[in-house]
Amino acid sequence: MHNKTTLQVLAAASGLADERIQELWEGADMYARAQAGDPDSPRYQQVLHERMAAMVEREVAKRHAADGEPWVLADAHLGQIEVSLSDALKAFGSRTHHVIH
C-alpha cells in the first residue's frame, strides 16, 4: 500500500476494520502483481485499484445486504475515488520530480 492514509481512507469510507482492509489489500496486491507485474507500473496501479474497489464493494454489500442501505455502497465508492485521486497525484508528483531532476 502506498501509505497508511490509504488504509485509513478505505476503512473510514467502507466501515470495515483496518485489519480487514489490510487483508483485502494484500489479496488485491497479489492479484495485481500476477496480472500486471511491476508494482511501479501504471497498469499495476490500475489493476490494483479496480480489484480493491471490487473487493471492498463485495465485502460492504455482504455486510449490509439485509439492511437495505444502498447509500453504503455510495460511501465506499466515494472513498475509493479519494484514494485513486490521492494515488494519481502522488504518481504525477513522482514522475514530475523524476523529469525535473
Image (cartoon, grey):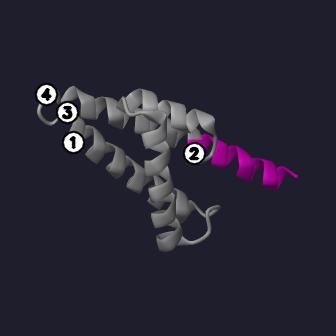
Amino acid identity at mark 4: Asp
Foreground: disc 2 or disc 1:
1
Residue identifier under label 1 = 62
Q: What stretch is highlighted in magenta?
A: 87-101
Left or right: where 39 falls relative to 70: right
- Based on the picture, tell me whether residue 98 belongs to the magenta stretch: yes
Foreground: disc 4 or disc 2:
4
Other-residue count near label 4 (Cα within 10 Å), few / some / many at <14 / 14–19 / ≥20: few
Amino acid identity at mark 3: His
Q: Which residue is drawn at 88% across and 52% down?
A: 101
Q: Distance between the residues labelled 4 and 2?
A: 34 Å
Other-residue count near label 3 (Cα within 10 Å), few / some / many at <14 / 14–19 / ≥20: some
Q: Earlier in the sequence, mark 4 or mark 1?
A: 1
Is disc 2 placed on a helix, strand or loop?
A: helix
Q: Where does the image place residue 28, in percent across and percent down from the top left?
A: 45, 57
**Front position in the image: 43 or 4:** 4
Q: Residue at x 62, y 46 (%)?
A: 2
Asked if disc 3 and disc 4 are in contact, CB closer than 8 Å, the reply is: yes
Residue identifier under label 4 = 67
- Residue 88's mark? 2
Amino acid identity at mark 1: Lys
Residue identifier under label 3 = 64
Is disc 1 placed on a helix, strand or loop?
A: helix
